[in-house]
């Protein structure tokens, strides 16, 4: 076998569904990405626009001197649908239902990279990435022929759909590049645009992160704009709607990697999540990608989901949160949820809180919620 054949075989043996090579050179996706940053569509993710990040993305030889090839791998993560868990806990993006995929990818890519350095190309230089650094992951995957970038701005494969995660290894050895898919197979389809509840796909191939539920429930650390809270619906962490809508996902294979299968979270409910302390949150989600939201962001999301469910059985727990939570961000969203549920008990809790709340922004939200809450 040639070194490339050995590398691809080793990657497939490690559990990746696809493994393909791109040659290094100027990458078309760079211009698109810079325009996205210039338009401010990255929201609070300021690190993406930092000069260091930008320079490294444009020139991967700053990461691996003498870089010649980029290996892209796809790890499938489609777990069994778990409607009962979603009903109990709200909806969690499928990639986040099990162990943190960064850890799973790290273990696999590190093992592969070690084998490359010690056995395939002794003394070679390389670096692995799994959503961990300044590289144009989707651009390299597209060039290697993993798939094409669809109108929802994720990579789709004609063979395995789009329920997969990308990883890369940058290499300073030349390997024969694979051919790109060469054609955008989205055609006239607009299902992902039509399925997006916040209209975050502002035009084909352009997602405004500031409107995207994935960004709002994970990366965004502040107040969720009021007009976006209702469209978030039942999404507690992330959003899968544009991927669910994509017809190419009928080809998506299930996750082979058991670590990515959904975790049960037995005994937990949305109301119980409201009472999570900082320590309790990080203990519960120690191995989960959900810890990225931090306790404040996560409990904020719980309040939004409870408000959208409009189930008055959640009023006592939300009232306690409005009264006692240490975070003004959480109290503000608890007030919103109570206003949305409405009714005598919710209004009474809001009225009580209005006499005690010292944070101006939370107080304004309480007043607004009281004025809108149904009697
Ligand atoms: S993840 Fe959800 S909110 Fe974001 S673009 Fe897709 S459908 Fe829209
Ligand atoms: S839903 Fe349609 S338009 Fe969107 S990515 Fe899939 S094929 Fe392309």
Image (cartoon, rainbow, N blue to C red):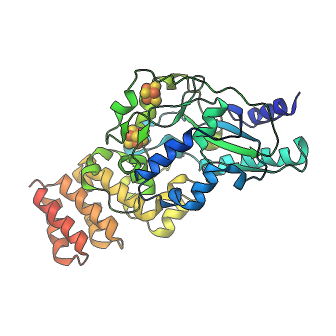
Classify 293 as above or below 86. Answer: below
Q: Quadrant of the N terminus?
A: top right
Identify the residue shown where x is 72% and y is 51%: 61
Q: Is residue 132 visible?
A: no
Expressed as whole percent of the image width and height from the top left, the position of residue 225 reads: 28, 56
Q: Residue furthest left?
A: 375
Whether residue 206 sits left or right of residue 322 in the image: it is right
Q: Total marks drawn?
A: 0
Q: Is residue 186 visible?
A: yes
160 or 210, which is in the foreground?
210
Expressed as whole percent of the image width and height from the top left, the position of residue 162 reads: 54, 32
Whether residue 165 sits left or right of residue 333 in the image: it is right
Expressed as whole percent of the image width and height from the top left, the position of residue 81 reads: 48, 34
Classify 30 as above or below 374. Answer: above
Identify the residue shown where x is 82% and y is 42%: 173
Classify 286 as above or below 163. Answer: below
261 or 197, which is in the foreground?
197
48 or 84, which is in the foreground?
48
Identify the residue shown where x is 56% and y is 61%: 51
Expressed as whole percent of the image width and height from the top left, the position of residue 12 reads: 74, 32
Classify 197 as above or below 298. Answer: above
**Ligand 1 positioned in quadrant:** top left
The image quarter containing residue 71 is: top right
Whether residue 232 sits left or right of residue 63 in the image: it is left
252 or 355, which is in the foreground?
252
Q: Quadrant of the C terminus?
A: bottom left
């Amino acid at each position: 076998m040639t070194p490339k054949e050995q590398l691809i075989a080793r990657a497939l043996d490690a559990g990746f569904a696809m493994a393909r090579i791109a040659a290094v050179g100027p990458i078309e996706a760079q211009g698109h990405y810079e325009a996205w940053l210039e338009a401010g569509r990255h929201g609070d993710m300021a690190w993406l626009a930092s000069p260091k990040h930008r320079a490294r993305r444009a020139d991967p030889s700053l990461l691996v001197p003498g870089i010649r090839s980029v290996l892209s791998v796809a790890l499938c993560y489609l777990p069994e649908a778990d409607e009962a868990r979603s009903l109990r806990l709200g909806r969690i993006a499928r990639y986040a239902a099990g162990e943190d995929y960064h850890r799973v990818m790290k273990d696999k890519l590190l093992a592969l990279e070690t084998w490359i350095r010690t056995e395939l190309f002794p003394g070679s230089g390389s670096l692995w990435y799994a959503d961990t650094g300044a590289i144009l992951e989707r651009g390299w995957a597209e060039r290697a022929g993993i798939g094409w970038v669809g109108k929802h701005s994720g990579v789709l494969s004609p063979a395995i759909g789009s329920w997969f995660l990308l990883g890369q290894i940058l290499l300073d050895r030349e390997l024969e590049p694979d051919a790109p898919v060469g054609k955008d197979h989205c055609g006239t389809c607009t299902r992902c645009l039509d399925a997006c509840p916040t209209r975050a796909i502002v035009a084909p191939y352009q997602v405004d992160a500031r409107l995207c539920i994935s960004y709002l429930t994970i990366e965004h650390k502040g107040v969720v704009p009021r007009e976006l809270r209702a469209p978030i619906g039942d999404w507690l962490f992330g959003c899968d709607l544009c991927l669910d809508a994509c017809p190419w996902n009928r080809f998506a294979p299930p996750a082979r990697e058991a670590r990515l299968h959904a975790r049960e979270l037995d005994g937990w409910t949305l109301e119980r999540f409201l009472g999570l302390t900082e320590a309790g949150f990080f203990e519960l989600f120690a191995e989960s990608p959900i810890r990225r939201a931090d306790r404040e962001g996560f409990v904020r999301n719980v309040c939004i989901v409870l408000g959208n469910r409009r189930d008055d059985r959640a009023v006592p727990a939300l009232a306690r949160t409005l009264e006692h939570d240490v975070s003004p961000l959480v109290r503000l969203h608890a007030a919103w949820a109570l206003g949305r549920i409405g009714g005598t008990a919710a209004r009474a809790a809001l009225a009580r809180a209005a006499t005690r709340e010292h944070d101006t922004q939370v107080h304004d939200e309480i007043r607004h919620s009281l004025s809108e809450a149904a009697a």
